[in-house]
Image: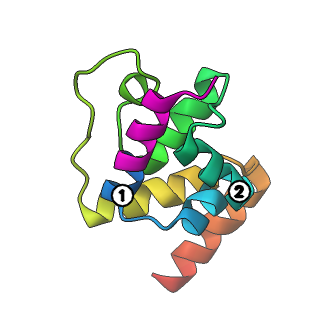
Amino acid sequence: MPDQKFASRFKTALQLSGLKQKELAQILGVHPSNITRYKEGKYVPDNLQDIAKIAKALGVNPAWLAGMTDEDKIVELSPEDVLRNKIETYLDDFDEQKLSKILTFIEQIL
């Protein structure tokens, strides 16, 4: 059965985040069709880690996105916070060696 509560909250959060569906798919490491399925309520992540990752990328409370609470739905994010969240979401997938290389690169351009 489709989860329209998740779908509705996902659509609201996506719109407020300013992210395009393709951008969110890249951040989450999923196929863009998954974003469409989330919006339509055809698929809801079945584990809290995935919901938390989506919520972080969109700048919302994971419990709100999952339908566990109606409080604290939207976390106010500055444009800088949105960029930081995008970067952090990408970095979550890297091992220590890759993170070290990224740090070296950042230090070189600063």
Q: Earlier in the sequence, mark 2 or mark 1?
A: 1
Q: Disc number at residue 15?
A: 1
Where, quadrant-wise, is the N terminus in this rendering? top right
Residue 8 on the magenta segment? yes
Q: Residue furthest front?
A: 1
Q: Is residue 96 above or below residue 26?
A: above
Q: Which residue is mark 2?
A: 33
Please name the amino acid that badge 1 sits on.
Gln
Q: Is residue 74 above or below residue 21?
A: above
Judged left or right of residue 52, residue 70 is: left
SS class, disc 1: helix
Where, quadrant-wise, is the C terminus in this rendering? bottom left
Q: Is residue 64 above or below residue 30?
A: above
User: How far across and how far down the image is residue 101, in percent?
Assistant: 71, 66
User: How far across and how far down the image is residue 44, in percent?
Assistant: 62, 31
Which span of residues is magenta-colored? Answer: 1-12
Q: Residue at x 48, y 38 (%)?
A: 7
User: How far across and how far down the image is residue 53, in percent?
Assistant: 55, 39
Between residue 51 and residue 39, name the one nearer to us. 39
Q: CA distance from mark 2 to mark 1?
A: 17 Å
Between residue 72 and residue 106, name the one nearer to us. 72
